[in-house]
Image: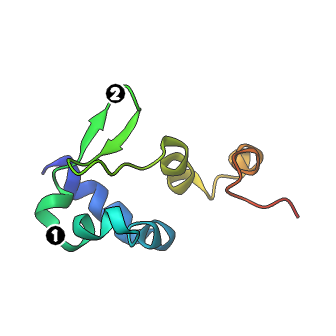
Amino acid sequence: MPEGHYVQQWATRNSRLDRQLRRSCFRAIKKYTALFSQLSVDKELETIIWPNGADLAPKYLYFKSFQNVFELQDQFKKWGYICNQ
């Protein structure tokens, strides 16, 4: 399977990421599976990108992948993904 398929499955399971994909540059990508599957990994940016110029911040992808790992909560607070209470 192409790597885009795995990312699409992962994105579907992450509701906050799903909301991010509703932003204007991601609408076409979310709507058309064929376009979504055209993602590639940009080694310089260290994240996934699409031909239309859309990309996701590497820290955001890391946060979404490991947001429930207790040991990483302080790092996520430093990055601003979790509010200090």
Report if the CB atoms under discs 2 and 1 are less than 8 Å apart: no
Report whether 8 appears left or right of 60: left
Q: Residue at x 47, y 74 (%)?
A: 15
Badge 1 crowding class, 10 Å Cα cut-off, few under 14, some 14 to 19, many 20 or more, is few
Q: Residue at x 41, y 69 (%)?
A: 23
Vertical position of residue 23 compared to residue 73: above or below? below
Q: Which mark is residue 32?
A: 1
Q: Residue at x 15, y 59 (%)?
A: 35
Badge 2 crowding class, 10 Å Cα cut-off, few under 14, some 14 to 19, many 20 or more, is few
Residue 64, given in percent of the width and then of the height, sits at: 52, 56
Mark 2 belongs to which amino acid? Lys
Residue 13, given in percent of the width and then of the height, sits at: 40, 70
Of marks 2 and 1, which one's residue comes earlier in the chain?
1
Q: Residue at x 67, y 56 (%)?
A: 81
Where is residue 78, by image quadrant? top right
Task: Give the spatial CA distance, label 2 vs label 1.
Answer: 25 Å
Colour pattern = rainbow
Residue 56, given in percent of the width and then of the height, sits at: 42, 50
Vertical position of residue 46 compared to residue 26: above or below? above
Report whether 47 appears left or right of 61: left
Mark 1 belongs to which amino acid? Tyr
SS class, disc 2: loop
Report whether 80 appears left or right of 6: right
Q: Which mark is residue 43?
A: 2
Q: Nearer the viewer, residue 83 or 55?
A: 55
Quadrant the C terminus occupies: bottom right
Residue 2, given in percent of the width and then of the height, sits at: 14, 49
Vertical position of residue 13 compared to residue 10: above or below? below
Of all residues, the one furthest to the right in this rendering is 85
SS class, disc 1: loop
